[in-house]
Amino acid sequence: STFLQRGSIYTLKLRQRGIDPFKEEDPNVLKQLYVRDIIDREPEVIPAAAPFVTILDLAVRSRHSSFFVTDEKQELLGAVSLSALRRFIFEQEALRDIVVAGDLVEPAPLAVREEDNLDVVMQLFSHLEVAEIAVVDAENPRKLIGSVHLPDVLNARNQELLRRDLAGSMTSTVSLVGKVRQVSVGDGYV
């Protein structure tokens, strides 16, 4: 069948639409997705000298689950997670004068870069007890440029699985054409 040949005009047209009936994809979809695709470029940043009440207020208002602590040069020192804050919430009066960097920050948070794939990110999430990881500059690993959220990684994975499923359905349809010569693909097209 001319339709199923590797270099035919039909397969070239399918490839232009992102479908390659002859391509075998890695079963781990996260290896083809990258941090740059889902980065949140507005992470929650707090200065190292911020008092405890500032971060408590931020925890109530923010949609973030981690707060990245920076020094006066805007370099990443560490992070404070919501889970860490929960341990101190009932002692807030006694901790009113505590400074974030000296007492709460979890030093040297594990960070990723924009060019890291989401498989690496997911492995980090499985080892850490956080739902948000810092994204740092490739040239300067202390420069915070964003964050990546666990729900965004899961959503990207699900979207890629859906795309592959649709492409797989098209591949099955293409194979069927070789046998019956004409197949309906919907909307009156054959």
Image: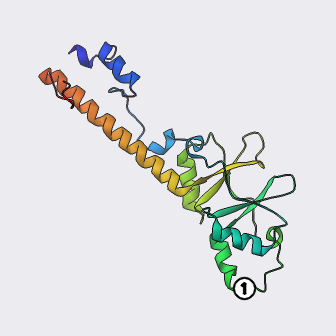
Q: Quadrant of the C terminus?
A: top left
Q: Is residue 26 above or below residue 182?
A: below
In the image, 41 versus 187, the foreground residue is 187
Give the residue drawn at x 75%, y 59%.
108
Give the residue drawn at x 57%, y 51%.
121
Q: Outermost residue, left direction?
A: 180
Give the residue drawn at x 44%, y 43%.
29
Where is residue 80? Give x, y as percent.
70, 66
Q: Is residue 115 above or below residue 44?
A: above
Q: Which residue, given by chain and number where applicable, does mark 1 sit on?
A: 91
Give the residue drawn at x 41%, y 49%.
158
Q: Is residue 160 left or right of residue 87?
A: left
Q: Quadrant of the N terminus?
A: top left
Where is residue 3? Give x, y as percent.
24, 17
Where is residue 18? Give x, y as percent.
40, 28
Specify the color scheme. rainbow
Where is residue 178? Give x, y as percent.
18, 21
Q: Outermost residue, right direction?
A: 72
Q: Amino acid at mark 1?
A: Glu
Q: Is residue 190 left or right of residue 17?
A: left
Using the rendered view, name the quadrant where residue 81 is placed: bottom right
Q: Secondary structure at mark 1?
A: helix
Q: Is residue 149 left or right of residue 185?
A: right
Mark count: 1
In the image, 117 versus 153, the foreground residue is 153
Dot 1, crowdedness within 10 Å: few (<14), some or many (≥20)?
few
Using the rendered view, name the quadrant where residue 116 is placed: top right
